[in-house]
Image (cartoon, coloured by chain):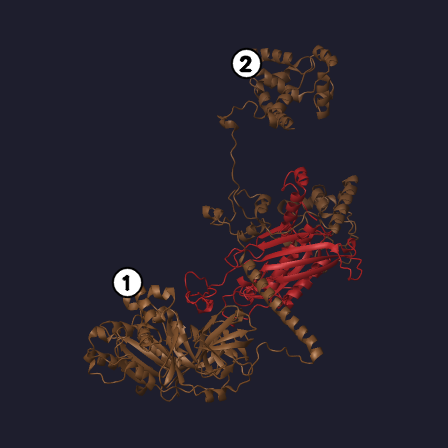
């Protein structure tokens, strides 16, 4: 006999979805697109810290602070290695670096799958190119290092509040910002893992965006947030070794007017990467002082040390 | 050695106060005098083994506010006596040796001769801080408050950060650390000038961590500024030059001129590798961690970042402080998972043993088969292989009929049946007298006849029928089986079980004032509707308790009028409805004719009316169907018995039957009808079957017993034509089929049908109004044996929603 006296409630509660496009202007929901309040050469503030995952050899967490209520980039990275390659793997005289970039299913407004899609695999290849130039692979023969980047909160390709079709949707501009973050955070994680590198690599983005209407509205900005701009015309990501002044990775795309040269754009991106380096240095220094307190003592605190590669 | 630490602390203090002393020189004459005396005293106390300048003694005195003892202690701890180190750093071994020497009389004299300056402070501290001496001078009770400790409970706190991590590094990590260390040592050996040279080769690039530490020295030498001529001078950077338009940023040792330039630049921009292209405002790019980051890193974050917010960012669960929570021992019992697993394990064991048994049987039969070439296990019960139908024809039994007695509670159903049986001498005078006496004992003499039918203690004490009671009697024309259904609304499932076995129904109505009306609102209507929807066509309405209204004719007519109107609306055809006035308690017009007061009534008595009923012929040729209405485990001879009405077909001793929905076979050992052992039984009879070769767990009340050759199928959904008693929506219901009931869901409302023609009137209605006929799809939660043209009742929350006929199996 089953229990017929009890009235069982529904197994789970649900909420009615509210779509932004159906809303009339209400005070609680802001429907005007966000605008960039920063200077064109001003970067978003970065929080970077290593040692997030105790079980990995090295790990780091990066987040970009946002002025408006928009989402901000949040990336974690773990580096596992150097560790011995499996027996089945062929001999390698160098460190086998493998990178994985995965967006968390909730990282973007459109839910991601659990299996890596082509965009994520593409990002991983870019990241690997960037890191390969900085790691001293010949110091670790017969070993491998897995760099796993998880994007907890990604960058939007365009403002979500736009009614679909009013403007062509973003073309992966958000991915470029994500890649820059990935490079920086992976660099921090590799440092945390104690893998020898020639330099600290940082990622930087610059973009040509349309500000007002017409041709003259083309402005070059550092660290663009695609949601803040009406249209992004071109963008460039670099992986940059600041103290050696080398670039290990360039990814550039888009169509800008002839007034802006590609070199200029790269130069701007390099500038953004160089500025990011200060944060990376601070984070590594901080981690080093936690690991080696006597170092901190002998140097008399955090701020006395000046570091450049 | 806590004593030493304390002394050290004091010495730090002393250093701190030194500045103060030097600044402040205006001592008063009194102070000077005190100082002088103090100095002499201290010198005496120190003895000749210390050679301390007066200035320091004065300082010590000043620090200790002219306390000679303290100053002495301080001085002793900060200064070494002229004698050997042994005195200051007295090891445990030395102390032991010393004490041994003290105890020996030879050394005693020696010691007394030399004024041995013991380190007083150390020794006294030792004695005090030693745990066993700690309570030495403490009184029992009344312990001074400064010695009392306070125990602070540690509140439960969540762990922060991510889980995992091991203290042990991997082999490679250890190798890395070793290399790093080696490298470090090597670097330490070389002069720092090697960094300054700036000839850092890629292959020999120093470890980053090391660089972090040494950057200060190499900073000035390593700026890389665009050279004015843009020439490439470095060795290692050849070929890594990106574009010719990019300014050359080589790491070269700058000339003094360039150095000056750099210094100018670094006034505004502190990072040396800046180029004109990156005039980015170098405001502090570091952000404070967001709330999310806080939760990721936890405590370590605020420590490392150095933010001095002391606010406790722990997420305390709100119920942790609740005293009930502490008391609650949630993990005392087995977890729900364990309960399920245990139950499953038990179940698995049962089936395993079962299967083992069957395997054993199979192998046994196989081995036997090899001998006798017969694979079949010989049945234990021998079938007589009768042709039951022929036997039935031959026996020329009186036709048998089952009728269900329905009606509202307390309308006298059981009493009427008791009276019937009593008057027909089925129950003898003695037992009725006994019941009457018992009923009088508890003060309910009118219940005596009802107790003929209601035999359980619960039914007797409550005065209501709970379960269907069966009894049989015989008239000249036929054999009858009474199914006395409970009238109370709580036992409607039992009433349905009873009604489903019946050929016709007897509806008992109390004629007394208000009782009829309350019954009409209550179960009178519902029972009549249910009986009709289960398939009962013939109904005898007995207007009972006519004696209480003095056989008042117009009352009888009124009831008959109201009921016939209702019954015709419920679907009974007027020719199948008859009305009998009677008095069950006194027995008037039941078997005996009506009294003289009821001269207006010329019709049949109740018993005569029963005999007029046409008895429906049962489908004997169809495959066997028997609804189990009772299961009982008797004695040793008949360990397991079932009883129920044979709906269709026939059976005989030795037959193999199949029980659904369990899908288990059993063998009939014996058959009983009306407590008489018989060899066979046919449809229409209520038979008791004694079974063999089946586990009782496979049988449940409501199961259907059928032949293995034509089994009933278990189905999970069906379409049905229903008559709605209440609003029918797609909703959860319980499907009743006899005693079997299964939770189900009305999945679809296909159409509302015309009552007369059965044609669809409205397709896909949203709701079926009460009184309408509709075709619906019902999905069962558990599979249930059902066949087409079977009657089902849909109930929900204790009320009958609809009744219907299974039309098709989906």
Establish if A19 lies above or below B217: below
Can you give x and y, in whole percent of width and height, for residue B25 in the image? 57, 18
For mark 1, give the secondary structure.
Answer: loop
- Disc 1 versus disc 2: nearer the observer: 1
Q: CA distance from mark 1 to mark 2?
A: 113 Å
Name the residue furthest front: B430
Q: Which residue is mark 2?
A: B31
Q: Is residue A257 something one can see in this rendering? A: no
Establish if B502 lies above or below A34: below
Relative placement, left or right, of A22 versus B55 is: left
Establish if A30 lies above or below A286: below
Q: Quadrant of residue B803?
A: bottom left
Q: What hue represents chain A? A: red
Q: Residue at x 53, y 41 (%)?
A: B154
Q: Quadrant of residue B345?
A: bottom right
Query: Label 1 marks which chain's residue?
Result: B
């Amino acid at each position: 006999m089953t229990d017929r006296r009890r009235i069982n409630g529904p197994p789970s509660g649900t909420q009615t979805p509210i779509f932004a496009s159906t809303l009339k202007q209400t005070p609680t929901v802001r429907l005007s697109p966000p605008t960039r309040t920063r200077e064109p050469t001003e970067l978003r503030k970065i929080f970077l810290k290593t040692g997030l995952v105790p079980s990995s050899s090295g790990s780091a967490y990066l987040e970009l602070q946002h002025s408006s209520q928009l989402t901000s980039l949040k990336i974690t990275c773990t580096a596992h290695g150097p560790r011995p390659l499996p027996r089945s793997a062929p001999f390698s005289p160098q460190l086998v670096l493998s990178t994985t970039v995965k967006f968390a299913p909730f990282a973007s407004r459109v839910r991601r799958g659990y299996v890596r899609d082509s965009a994520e695999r593409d990002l991983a290849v870019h990241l690997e190119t960037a890191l390969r130039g900085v790691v001293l692979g010949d110091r670790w023969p017969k070993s491998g290092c897995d760099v796993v980047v998880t994007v907890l909160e990604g960058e939007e390709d365009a403002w979500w509040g736009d009614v679909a079709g009013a403007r062509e949707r973003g073309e992966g501009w958000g991915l470029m910002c994500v890649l820059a973050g990935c490079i920086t955070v992976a660099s921090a994680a590799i440092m945390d893992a104690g893998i020898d590198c020639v330099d600290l690599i940082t990622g930087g983005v610059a973009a040509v965006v349309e500000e007002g209407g017409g041709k003259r509205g083309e402005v070059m900005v550092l660290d663009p947030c695609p949601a803040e701009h009406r249209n992004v015309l071109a963008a460039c990501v670099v992986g940059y070794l600041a103290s050696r002044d080398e670039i290990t990775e360039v990814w550039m795309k888009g169509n800008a007017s002839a007034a802006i040269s590609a070199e200029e754009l790269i130069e701007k991106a390099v500038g953004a990467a160089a500025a990011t380096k200060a944060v990376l240095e601070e984070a590594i220094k901080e981690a080093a002082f936690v690991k080696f307190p006597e170092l901190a003592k002998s140097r008399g605190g955090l701020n006395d040390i000046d570091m450049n590669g | 050695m806590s004593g030493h630490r304390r002394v050290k602390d004091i010495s730090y203090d002393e250093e701190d106060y030194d500045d103060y002393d030097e600044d402040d020189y205006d001592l008063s004459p009194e102070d000077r005098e005190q100082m002088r005396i103090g100095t002499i005293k201290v010198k005496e106390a120190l003895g000749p083994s210390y050679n301390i300048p007066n200035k320091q003694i004065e300082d010590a005195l000043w620090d200790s506010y002219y306390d000679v003892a303290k100053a002495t202690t301080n001085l002793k701890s900060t200064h070494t006596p002229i004698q050997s180190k042994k005195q200051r750093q007295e090891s445990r071994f030395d102390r032991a040796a010393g004490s041994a020497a003290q105890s020996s009389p030879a050394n005693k004299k020696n010691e007394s001769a030399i004024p041995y300056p013991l380190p007083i402070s150390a020794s006294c501290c030792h004695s005090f801080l030693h745990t066993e001496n700690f309570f030495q001078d403490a009184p029992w009770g009344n312990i001074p408050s400064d010695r009392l400790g306070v125990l602070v409970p540690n509140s439960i706190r969540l762990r922060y950060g991510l889980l995992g991590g091991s203290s042990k590094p991997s082999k490679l990590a250890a190798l890395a650390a070793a290399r790093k260390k080696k490298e470090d040592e090597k670097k330490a050996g070389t002069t720092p000038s090697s960094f300054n040279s700036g000839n850092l080769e890629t292959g020999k690039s120093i470890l980053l961590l090391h660089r972090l530490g040494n950057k200060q020295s190499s900073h000035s030498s390593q700026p890389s500024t665009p050279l004015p001529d843009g020439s490439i001078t470095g060795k290692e950077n050849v070929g890594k030059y990106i574009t010719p338009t990019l300014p050359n940023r080589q790491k070269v040792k700058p000339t003094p001129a360039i150095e000056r330039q750099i210094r100018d630049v670094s006034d505004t921009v502190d990072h040396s590798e800046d180029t004109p292209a990156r005039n980015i405002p170098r405001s502090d790019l570091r952000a404070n961690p967001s709330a999310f980051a806080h939760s990721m890193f936890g405590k370590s974050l605020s420590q490392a970042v150095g933010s001095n917010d002391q606010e406790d960012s722990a997420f305390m669960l709100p119920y942790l402080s609740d005293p009930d929570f502490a008391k609650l021992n949630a993990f005392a019992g087995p977890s729900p998972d364990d309960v399920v697993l245990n139950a499953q394990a038990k179940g698995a064991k049962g089936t395993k043993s079962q299967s083992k048994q069957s395997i054993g049987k199979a192998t046994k039969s196989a081995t036997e088969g090899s001998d006798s070439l017969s694979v079949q296990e010989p049945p234990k019960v021998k079938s007589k292989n009768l042709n039951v139908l022929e036997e039935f024809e031959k026996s020329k039994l009186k036709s048998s009929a089952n009728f269900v007695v329905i009606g509202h509670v307390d309308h006298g159903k059981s009493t009427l049946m008791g009276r019937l049986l009593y008057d027909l001498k089925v129950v003898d005078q003695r037992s009725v007298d006994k019941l009457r006496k018992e009923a009088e004992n508890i003060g309910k003499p009118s219940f005596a006849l009802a107790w003929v039918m209601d035999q359980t203690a619960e039914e007797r004490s409550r005065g209501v029928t709970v379960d269907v009671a069966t009894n049989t009697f015989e008239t000249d024309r036929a054999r009858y089986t009474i199914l006395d259904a409970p009238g109370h609304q709580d036992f409607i499932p039992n009433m349905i079980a009873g009604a489903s076995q019946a050929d016709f129904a007897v509806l008992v109505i109390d004629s007394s004032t208000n009782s009829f009306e309350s019954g009409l609102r209550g179960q009178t209507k519902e029972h009549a509707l249910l009986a009709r929807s289960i398939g009962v066509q013939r109904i005898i309405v007995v207007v009972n308790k006519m004696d209480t209204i003095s056989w008042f004719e117009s009352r009888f007519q009124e009831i008959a009028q109201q009921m016939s109107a209702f019954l015709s609306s419920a679907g009974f055809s007027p020719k199948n409805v008859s009305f009998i006035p009677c008095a069950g308690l006194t027995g008037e017009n039941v078997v005996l004719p009506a009294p003289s007061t009821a001269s207006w009534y010329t019709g049949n008595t109740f018993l005569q009316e029963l005999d007029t009923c046409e008895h429906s012929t049962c489908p004997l040729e169809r495959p066997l169907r028997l609804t189990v209405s009772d299961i009982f485990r008797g004695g040793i001879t008949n360990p397991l018995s079932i009883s129920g009405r044979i709906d269709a077909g026939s059976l005989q001793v030795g037959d193999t039957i199949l029980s659904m929905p369990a899908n288990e076979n059993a063998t009939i050992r014996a058959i009983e009808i009306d407590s008489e052992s018989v060899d066979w039984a046919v449809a229409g009879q209520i038979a008791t079957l004694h079974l063999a070769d089946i586990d009782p767990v496979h049988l449940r009340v409501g199961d259907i017993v059928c032949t293995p050759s034509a089994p009933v199928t278990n189905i999970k959904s069906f379409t049905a034509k229903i008559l709605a008693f209440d609003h029918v929506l797609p909703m959860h219901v319980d499907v009743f089929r006899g005693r079997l009931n299964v939770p189900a869901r009305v999945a679809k409302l296909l159409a509302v049908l015309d009552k007369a023609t059965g044609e669809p009137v409205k397709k896909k209605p949203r709701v079926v109004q009460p009184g309408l006929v509709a075709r619906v799809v019902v999905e069962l939660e558990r599979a249930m044996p059902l066949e087409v043209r079977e009657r089902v009742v849909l109930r929900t929350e204790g009320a009958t929603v609809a009744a219907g006929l299974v039309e098709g199996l989906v």
